[in-house]
Image: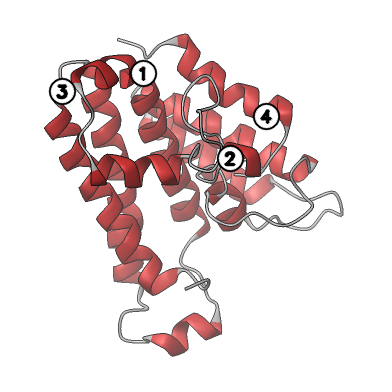
Amino acid sequence: MVIGKNAWAALSAVMVLGGGLLVMVRPGLAADDDEKKAKEGVLKIAKALEENKKDVATKEAGQMVKNLKDSKGEPLDLAELAMNVMKLREDGGFGFGAKPGKNPKTDGIEDKLKELVDKELTKEELAAQYDDLAAMGYAIAAVSHVAQAKGMPTDVDVKKRDPKKFTKDEWTKWSEGLSKEGLALAELAKSKKATSGEIQAAAKKLSDTCTNCHKTFDPRD
């Protein structure tokens, strides 16, 4: 079973409108061509994962890290660019769903994940969101593939915060965990048989993985 066309169309439309990709948006670069290229790469990886072509997804992520350059020929900061898909639609992220949500201040993958953790969807909401939840899960897993391909961050300031936890083993655990939990949420939603409780439980695991990874490896904290 393939998720609805509208779910992927929503992600593809963002590339036409411009924007960034999962956690940190650089001011003034919402329509930057470099970010558009990175966004296209994330979407391609997400589709490969949805088609259960994990080898293709890994290869695409590796090529993305190796080949993607900015307009000056310099390597792009893919950790930042890939992460921006999680931001609000109005900030250049993918947003959640085929159409903009009623509240632009919460219309983003990151905010949707928090919402799922905080409150179970009603049966009606769940039925209407299965495809979009699946697309969201694959997008998160795709971002993880880019992060894994790039490798553990080497920011010195991050190392100073907790050097005991800033290890390759920890990086592998959390970055691979992000992919695993993203795919778990996606597959649950794609089946269209999951209950609201099951979706919430999967969202919580995914959220906890994100939080634990950021605590150690995200220099913004």
Give the SS element for disc 1. Answer: helix
- Residue 37 appears at what percent x and percent y? 70, 37
Location of mark 2 (residue) = 93
- Residue 95 appears at what percent x and percent y? 52, 34
Residue appearing at x 45%, y 84% in the figure: 159
Residue appearing at x 55%, y 21% in the figure: 10
Which circle's residue, 1 or 3, is located before the other in the chain?
A: 1
User: Which label sits in the foreground, 4 or 2?
Assistant: 2
Label 2 is placed on what type of residue? Gly
**Which of the 4 image quadrants contains residue 90?**
top right
Which circle's residue, 3 or 4, is located before the other in the chain?
A: 4
Give the SS element for disc 4. Answer: helix
Gap between marks 1 and 3 measured at Cα: 12 Å
Gap between marks 4 and 2 measured at Cα: 9 Å
Residue appearing at x 47%, y 68% in the figure: 218
Location of mark 1 (residue) = 131
Location of mark 3 (residue) = 194
Q: Is residue 175 above or below residue 215?
A: above
Mark 2 residue crowding within 10 angstroms, few (<14) / some (14–19) / many (20+)? many
